[in-house]
Amino acid sequence: MAELLTNVLCSNCKAAGLELETESSAMCRYCGTVNQIKGVICPHCEAINPLGAETCEACHQSLIRRCQNCNTPNWAGAELCIRCQAPLDTISALGARYRTDTAGRLRAQRHDAASIKAKEAVDSERRMAEFNAIEQRRQQHLNQATETRNGQQRLWIAVLIVLGFVVIAAVVIGLALVATH
Ligand SMILES: [Zn+2]
Ligand SMILES: [Zn+2]
Ligand SMILES: [Zn+2]
């Protein structure tokens, strides 16, 4: 079974959504890179056929169209003859292009949906990071408040101990004075 162009990822941005350009090249609709494809792409079903194939392995339509002017075999998706530049069968070429565009639009929509999801993931990660930063600052404030309170308590204990000594000293001195009289 021939591989489909739909499943080929862009060599540059790795997106699926290559737009058929010529028999062996397809342009990425997201980054514009022209990807070279090994083989002949069927303009009817976008299957990738081996080089030199004349009939599509997948849909069995002809990959070749002869110029009515000079009889040169052209790729079935070409619009102008490679030799004499005469327009080839434009109606079927337009038909092939229309099918490509419809399939392409569907792929583009899927790609957009995927990139929106990716953006949402980034946004929610950023919100998490912001939340974590706020939480961290809150914890720091709490710790500072606790330290300040502990410091104040230590100060009060020191003051009470000093006062206790002063009272004891006063009592001792008072007793000593009473005893000497
Ligand atoms: Zn790309
Ligand atoms: Zn085909
Ligand atoms: Zn021609």
Image (cartoon, rainbow, N blue to C red):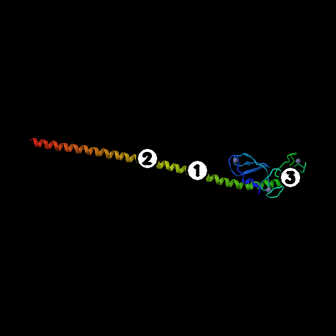
* Disc 3/disc 1 C-alpha distance (Å): 49 Å
Residue 100's tag is none
Residue situated in front as seen by the camera: 93 or 20: 20
Is 43 left or right of 157, judged from the image as shown?
right
- Amino acid type at circle 1 is Val
* Disc 3/disc 2 C-alpha distance (Å): 76 Å
Q: Name the residue located 86 percent from the left edge and 52 percent from the top edge.
A: 65
Residue situated in front as seen by the camera: 71 or 54: 54
Residue 157 on image: x %, y %:
29, 46
- Amino acid type at circle 3 is Arg
Q: Name the residue located 16 percent from the left edge and 41 percent from the top edge.
A: 173
In the rendered image, which quarter is residue 166 located in? top left
How packed mark 2 is, by other alpha carbons closer than 10 Å (few <14, some 14-19, many 20 or more), is few
Is 121 left or right of 104, judged from the image as shown?
left
Residue 153 on image: x %, y %:
32, 47
Residue 100 on image: x %, y %:
76, 54
* Mark 3 within 8 Å of ligand 3, using the beta carbon: no
Circle 2: element type:
helix
Q: Name the residue located 48 percent from the left edge and 48 percent from the top edge.
A: 134
Residue 65's tag is 3
Residue, far bottom: 59
- Number of marks in picture: 3
Is there any visible trace of residue 137 in the rendered image?
Answer: yes
Residue 180 on image: x %, y %:
10, 41
* Residue located beneath label 1 in the image: 122
- Amino acid type at circle 2 is Gln
Of the 4 image quadrants, the one containing the C terminus is top left
How packed mark 1 is, by other alpha carbons closer than 10 Å (few <14, some 14-19, many 20 or more), is few
Residue, far left: 181
Circle 3: element type:
strand
